[in-house]
């Protein structure tokens, strides 16, 4: 319980700062400040007593329920309680190492970090930093990328080779802010990236958040805790890629790849061999990635990759090539194999679903013997499920009859609004829609469907009597996959549907 208390205490300074800012905003009549204060008080109300600080819960409750006229007063009383607990509770000394050759930057950082750390050391070269690391354990390291005697990225690699240094958060500082530099630093083991020139307040927030995350990971043996440290970076790239997919309708693939039986290598040959294997795998993976691809290294030695503008089939070829070179490299040294799971991001509705699915596919690949790639596939039931939006009941009956005769299951909707509700609630292998319909026409239905999570690549066939060239162009620009004019041949309709579904297989 004492260890949990320490973690909780160390999380309070950043919350105190946030409360102070919100109270100042409230006094200046800033919109939303009161709501933010009550929300923060609510979170501390639940955790205070749990961690052994009933005074926190009591003060937080008063902030939650007080009238608006008393909110400033109660909030300041709450802040006083939090500060009193932080000052009165014995804590493990926090130490910081700043590796930077700019004396002005170092001075600013030391002044900024003084209230967070009990001791701050500085090193203008890697050589001096090595000496300090031999003499002192550090709670956190701030590392500049450009030093007189060594490239900061090389330093990062060297530091992460040490078992102890794997447990120390390292934040990279640099004026080089393009995506490739950030991506490389995260892949090499950085826990965060501070852009120069920086705002002291932002540095404090980044440092405090990183310390809190590492404290939590040290106190628990759960493997997924450490993995969650950089999750926001991976999630951020996922969101950007997913937004681009919705605009362009291009494919993108999420890959989870890991060394088979890595724990066995660690147990039999030690952590140095494990590190060597993971580093070699990372280098080979990097050699086969393109500039637009994103590589993320998890703390358990596995990797996630996001491959924009890449279908599942193309992604599997890329990954199979990686696995081939990994097998070949092992013949000269330690033989190891890797497995991977792949999922098309257009077929999932959220980041959580994407990661859950790809993790399950990776486990499946390893359980089937390893050294293989498993792709997400659509279920047989989904392959046969079609949505039909058509306001002409007689026409709808003809279409439904032919679809069922061909072995398809059909959900029928008589207007665009009902069809949209159906698309939101259910996944379909293919959608057929007329253009002229009540409430929402086919163009608007198509536009909204393409904005739904998981519906980016669902094939849509426009079936209509509107054969104007402008209408056809508008349909394809809106995301239609095919366009068939009424009256139509039922055989042609089924043939077109089968052709589109084969493209998904």
Image: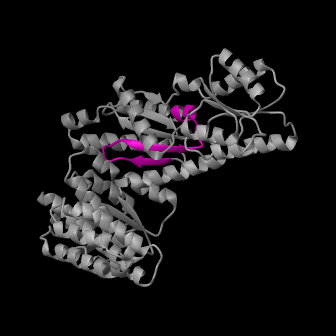
Q: Which residues are magenta?
A: 294-316
Q: Is residue 85 magenta?
A: no
Residue 433 percent across, percent down from the top left: 72, 35
406, above or below 83, in the image? above
- Name the outermost residue toward the front: 67
- Colour treatment of the image: one colour
Residue 389 percent across, percent down from the top left: 69, 34
Q: Is residue 295 magenta?
A: yes
Residue at 21% x, 64% y is 48
Q: Quadrant of residue 499?
A: top right
Residue at 53% x, 43% y is 307
Residue 265 percent across, percent down from the top left: 25, 35
- Name the outermost residue toward the right: 468
105 lies left or right of 134: right
Does residue 149 appear in the picture of this structure? Answer: no
Residue at 60% x, 50% y is 244
Does residue 273 appear in the picture of this structure? Answer: yes
Q: Quadrant of the C terminus?
A: top right
Q: Quadrant of residue 51?
A: bottom left
301, 71: nearer the viewer: 71
256, above or below 40, in the image? above
Q: Quadrant of the N terminus?
A: bottom left
427, 313: nearer the viewer: 427
Q: Quadrant of residue 88?
A: bottom left
Report how many numbered discs are placed on residues in the image: 0
415 lies left or right of 330: right
């Amino acid at each position: 319980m004492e260890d949990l208390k320490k973690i909780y205490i160390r999380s309070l300074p950043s919350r105190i700062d946030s409360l102070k800012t919100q109270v100042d905003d409230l006094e200046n009549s800033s919109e939303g400040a009161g709501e933010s204060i009550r929300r923060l008080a609510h979170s501390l109300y639940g955790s205070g007593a749990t961690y052994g600080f009933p005074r926190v819960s009591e003060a937080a409750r008063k902030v939650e329920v007080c009238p608006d006229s008393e909110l400033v007063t109660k909030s300041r009383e709450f802040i006083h309680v939090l500060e009193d607990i932080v000052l009165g509770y014995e804590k493990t000394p926090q130490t910081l190492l700043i590796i930077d050759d700019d004396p002005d930057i170092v001075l600013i950082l030391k002044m900024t970090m003084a209230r967070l750390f009990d001791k701050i050391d500085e090193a203008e070269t890697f050589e001096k930093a090595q000496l300090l690391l031999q003499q002192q354990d550090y709670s956190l390291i701030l590392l500049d990328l450009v030093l007189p005697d060594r490239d900061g990225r090389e330093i990062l690699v060297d530091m992460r080779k040490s078992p102890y240094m794997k447990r120390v958060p390292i934040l990279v500082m640099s004026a080089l802010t393009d995506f490739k530099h950030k991506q490389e630093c995260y892949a090499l083991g950085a826990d965060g990236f501070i852009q120069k020139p920086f705002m002291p307040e932002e540095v404090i927030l980044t440092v405090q958040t990183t310390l809190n995350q590492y404290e939590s990971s040290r106190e628990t043996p759960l493997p997924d805790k450490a993995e969650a440290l950089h999750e926001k970076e991976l999630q951020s790239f996922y969101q950007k890629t997913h937004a681009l997919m919705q605009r362009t309708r291009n494919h993108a693939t999420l890959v989870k790849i890991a060394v088979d039986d890595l724990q066995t290598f660690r147990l039999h040959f030690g952590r140095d061999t494990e590190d060597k294997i993971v580093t070699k795998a990372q280098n080979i993976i990097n050699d086969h990635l393109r500039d637009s691809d994103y590589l993320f290294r998890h703390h358990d030695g596995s990797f996630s990759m996001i491959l924009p503008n890449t279908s599942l089939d193309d992604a599997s070829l890329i990954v199979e090539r990686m696995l081939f070179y990994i097998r070949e490299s092992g013949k000269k040294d330690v033989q190891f194999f890797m497995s991977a799971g792949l999922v098309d991001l257009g077929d999932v509705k959220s980041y959580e679903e994407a990661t859950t699915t790809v993790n399950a596919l990776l486990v499946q690949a390893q359980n089937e013997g390893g050294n293989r790639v498993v792709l997400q596939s659509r279920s047989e039931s989904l392959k046969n499920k079609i949505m039909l939006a058509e306001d002409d009941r007689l026409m709808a009956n003809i279409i439904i009859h032919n679809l069922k005769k061909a072995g398809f299951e059909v959900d029928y909707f008589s207007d665009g609004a009902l069809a949209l509700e159906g698309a939101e609630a259910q996944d379909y292998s293919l959608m057929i829609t007329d253009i002229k319909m009540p409430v929402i026409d086919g163009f608007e239905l198509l536009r909204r469907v393409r904005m739904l999570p998981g519906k980016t690549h669902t094939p849509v066939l426009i079936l209509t009597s509107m054969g104007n060239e402008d209408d056809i162009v508008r349909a394809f620009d809106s995301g239609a996959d095919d366009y068939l004019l009424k009256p139509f041949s039922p055989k042609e309709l089924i043939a077109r549907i089968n052709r589109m579904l084969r493209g998904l297989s």
